[in-house]
Amino acid sequence: MKSKIQFVLCLLMGLMFINAGLDKFLHYMPMPKDMPENMVKVMAAYKEIGWLLPLVGAIEVIGGLLFIIPRTRPLGAIVILPVLTGILLANINTAPSGLPIVFVLIAILLWVIIDNREKYLPMIRK
């Protein structure tokens, strides 16, 4: 039962990251009308740096795909971790209303990391 719940949550989270990453290339999702002014300024600044959004988009798509597949999920969690950290910091600084969904995503990510901790141990052992 636990593995089925984890699979569904990881599937949904992976699809969210794939969707967000593809939007950085294809721009098919409209900007929300009620987005805080600070967040609009931050997004405009990100667009000014021409290489940043495609890089983050590629990482989100790759990380989302890896996160969906159970065999590669631990690697996907590590790939998604810095992106999710950036999302958390951006929401703390500019749009605190988005924090609840960020905390849910962080909880799912931490569950996967803790559940697969034995796979990370060789990286930190001498």
Image (cartoon, helix red, strand yellow):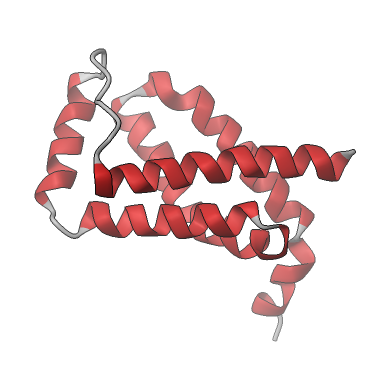
**In the orientation shown, which residue stands out farthest toward the right?**
1
Farthest left residue?
A: 48
Q: Is residue 50 left or right of residue 110?
A: left
| Residue that sits furthest to the top in the current view | 34
Displayed quadrant of residue 42:
top left
> Residue 100: x and y, percent?
52, 23
Q: Residue at x 60, y 37 (%)?
A: 12
Instruction: Tell me: 112 left or right of 90.
Output: right
Which residue occupies 66% across, 76% down? 124
Q: Residue at horizontal 44%, vertical 54%?
A: 61
Count how many numbered circles sit on residues in the image: 0
Q: In which quadrant will I find the N terminus?
A: top right
Q: Quadrant of the C terminus?
A: bottom right
Q: Position of residue 57 (x, y in %)?
A: 34, 52
Q: Residue at x 39, y 41 (%)?
A: 20
Q: Is residue 80 left or right of residue 4?
A: left
Position of residue 46 relative to residue 122, above or below, is: above
Q: Residue 63: x, y in percent?
A: 50, 57
Q: Quadrant of residue 96?
A: top left
Would you place residue 53 above or below residue 51 in this image?
above
The one nearer the camera, 63 or 43, is 63
**Rendering coords of residue 8 (x, y %):** 71, 38
Q: Nearer the viewer, residue 74 or 86?
A: 74
